[in-house]
Amino acid sequence: MLQPWKSSIITSSGIILLDQLTKWWALERLEQGQIVELFWTLQFRLVRNTGIAFSQGENLGPVFTILILFVILLVIRLGAQIQSKVGKVSVGLVIGGAIGNLVDRVFRAEEGFLSGGVVDFVDFQWWPVFNIADSAIVVGGLMMFWAGMKSTEHSEEKIDSDRVSTDSYEQ
């Protein structure tokens, strides 16, 4: 039973670990307002996001937590239908990223239940500040879309192939 989910579980576990380790580093290194400049406009700068993407919906942590749990369950359910390795990895990326940010909301709460802000620290200065979990969700979502498109193409090719075989048989 575990075998089909193996790549999803390994991927999500890796993302959660990497995400939490980098957030721990950011909290230790960037807490006093320090900024680590890397190259071009890329820098590390600590931001706590109590909203969702692009800091929309500030201070609605409990609502977003329920929505995140719903999305995780939905992705798991949809993931059960995915057969490809790429699809399974994409499910792992999305679930790992969602859980990584959920951990922040639950365990970094300072002002009440589920009020924790997600730790963001990757800053291009022209794009909203984000983290490893956010990246995993976006990449996983794009991969899931791509895998779905490939699956649709494969299904259409099979239908066309079956149709050609049927037409040849009928003649």
Image (cartoon, grey):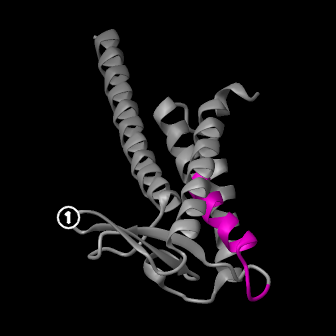
Q: Quadrant of residue 143?
A: top left
The image quarter containing residue 70 is bottom right
Residue 162 versus residue 35 in the image, above or below: above
Q: Determine the residue positioned at 62% across, 59% down.
A: 100
Q: Position of residue 110 (x, y in %)?
A: 73, 84
Horizontal and vertical percent position of residue 107: 74, 70
Q: Quadrant for the N terminus, please.
A: top right
Q: Is 11 drawn above or below residue 125 in the view shown?
A: above
**Residue sitting at x 79%, y 82%:** 113
Q: Is residue 51 above or below residue 165?
A: below
| Residue 12 counted in the magenta span | no
Q: Secondary structure at mark 1?
A: loop
Q: Which residues are magenta?
A: 96-112
Q: Position of residue 167 (x, y in %)?
A: 30, 18
Residue shown at the point (33%, 67%) measured from the top left: 43
Front residue (pair 64, 159):
64
Q: Residue furthest right?
A: 113
In the picture of the structure, the residue carrying the numbered disc 1 is 40
Residue drawn where x is 65% and y is 72% of the image: 67
Q: Quadrant of the C terminus?
A: top left
Q: Is residue 40 above or below residue 167?
A: below
In the rendered image, residue 109 lying in the magenta stretch gets the answer yes
Task: Provide the major secondary structure of the magenta segment.
Answer: helix
Q: Quadrant of residue 25?
A: bottom right
x and y, in percent, of residue 58 in the image:
56, 89
- As rendered, which of 121 and 95 lies closer to the eye? 121
Does residue 48 appear left or right of residue 159 in this picture? right
Q: Amino acid at mark 1?
A: Trp
